Amino acid sequence: MKTNVLELKDYIVFAVYFVIVAAYGLYIYRKKKSAKSDSKDYFLAEGSLTWWAIGASLIASNISAEQFIGMSGSGFKMGLAIATYEWMAAATLIIVAIFFIPVYLKNNIATMPQFLHQRYNGTVAMIMAVFWLLLYVVVNLTSILYLGALAVSSISGFSLAACMYAIAIFAVIITLGGMKVIGYTDVIQVFFLILGGLATTYLALNLVSDHYGTKGILEGYNLMTSKASEHFHMILKPDNENYIDLPGLSVLIGGMWIVNLNYWGCNQYITQRALGADLNTARGGLLFAAFLKLLMPIIVVLPGIAAYVLYKEGHFQTEMVHDGSVNPDRAYPVLLNLLPAGLKGLSFAALTAAVVASLAGKANSIATIFTLDVYQKVFNTKASEKNLITTGKITIIAAMILAVLIAPHLGIDKKGGFQYIQEYTGFVSPGIFAMFILGFFWKKTTSKAALFATIGGFIFSLFLKVLPSIADLSWLSPMGFAVPNTKGIYEIPFIDRMGFVFLFCVVGMYIISVIDNRRGIAPKGLEVDPKMFKTSRSFAIGTMVILALLTILYTVYW
């Protein structure tokens, strides 16, 4: 793919971004630094983050290269339907704010393994702590670094290795300051992320309108809806080639809920932002994040659809091709390379901000779990607060070094980076979510049942993945639960597969828990008071506004 290197104006804009983030981070570190800092303050920024800092930090940590590059690529390939990940996340954040966060805060939960230890036992907690550490380091941290460096390299012209080293060092500098520095610098990161993202969308829509001899972004959008009308449907039909990735109504009433509720409600990487705040502040932050989620498709999906329309009209014929076939993940970098000097630097800063913020958030979560759930419980039960913070900083550096070493060996699946990550994360999400949701709201759930969900859910996911190769599933086709792949073999869409695995785990957990209860095994409970689910009037109003907007969006683009 042809690459336009950055010009002097772009470097100046990027330098301004870097200086602002670094200076503000240093200012926050010195301002918020207490005379006697403890581990909770370092890892959770206890009491230091405002609602807007929490909301911005959630978005900055969530939006990374897989959204900018992968989701734009999915927009090129399948259209607006991919935006369901963003819009359903808005509804999910509201549910997490009302029902999940109060449970965590009421029971003084600092990490997800701590929740499992308090609700089940130390064995479940330690197994999941080690599992999360492996997942976060080997899969999440590494994929964020690789995809981010790949995107930055394609835009800047620098080598992939140089971009990986630079991004990793930048992220480590921010992460070592602790959660309060991450939280407040994320506000700056989100500013650049949104501003730079909007610049790319503006360019893309203008390119479409210019091609057809009209002017303005509204004309560009109207032309996109008419020239690629098939790309503006949220609910795909079974005969759509992308149905296997987004299976119709399952995105509204099926497995998509498991994807989102597990990610936003049972994920240290995300919930950590709210665990150090009081309930009203945490809820305000989640509501703010939900509102920002409504806007994200404008930044990460529309450019991909615009690139598709232009590609159909003969543009980017060489740039979009890789190894003899069209690679959707090239859509966003192709558009960025068309930006004029200065604006290209701004979008480059936005992409870098998204990657660095995600890396910093993930590295902090890795350090938190390892320090509080592994090191303190296994290696040094009497560790001082200073020792815990030092261990956390060492863990951050070690995790980033591992990511840098592993990242060059990764590759991108042809279906697109975003969908690839979603599908393979789905092997473990249903079991984990079942373990959490029953642990929250059914007091009779036992430790054996939790272990079954974790291990059994993963095994059943693998079974359903390989089932099409050993059995004919065409009989599920009339119900929409199986569609033919490129080889003509009927597969279960992975979102539906997650729904089936979740139900399997819930039924299995129920049976095991009932048997354990009859044997006299008394499960450990949590402190849950129905009154803590009551929300403030302002939160209720904000919720109604967001839900009304979601209803309108899904109605218009059904």
Image (tube, rainbow, N blue to C red):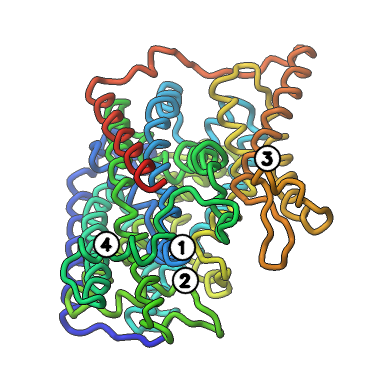
Q: Nearer the viewer, residue 86 or 539?
A: 86
Who comes first in sequence, dot 2 or dot 3? 2
Quick one: SS at disc 3? helix
Number of callouts:
4
Looking at the image, do the residues carrying marks 2 and 1 touch, with CB atoms under 8 Å apart? yes
Who comes first in sequence, dot 4 or dot 1? 1
From the image, tell me which residue sits under label 1.
74
Using a 10 Å C-alpha cutoff, classify the residue at mark 1 as few (fewer than 14 neighbours), some (14 to 19) or many (20 or more): many
Using a 10 Å C-alpha cutoff, classify the residue at mark 3 as few (fewer than 14 neighbours), some (14 to 19) or many (20 or more): many
Three-letter residue code for mark 3 = Val
Quick one: SS at disc 1? helix
From the image, tell me which residue sits under label 3.
501
Quick one: SS at disc 4? helix
From the image, tell me which residue sits under label 2.
328
Residue 15 image offset from top left, x and y in percent: 19, 72
In the rendered structure, the answer to whether residue 92 lies left or right of residue 469 reads left
Looking at the image, do the residues carrying marks 3 and 4 touch, with CB atoms under 8 Å apart? no
Quick one: SS at disc 2? helix
From the image, tell me which residue sits under label 4.
221
Who comes first in sequence, dot 2 or dot 4? 4
Distance of label 2 from label 3 (alpha carbons): 30 Å
Q: Residue at x 68, y 35 (%)?
A: 453
Q: Residue at x 28, y 24 (%)?
A: 540
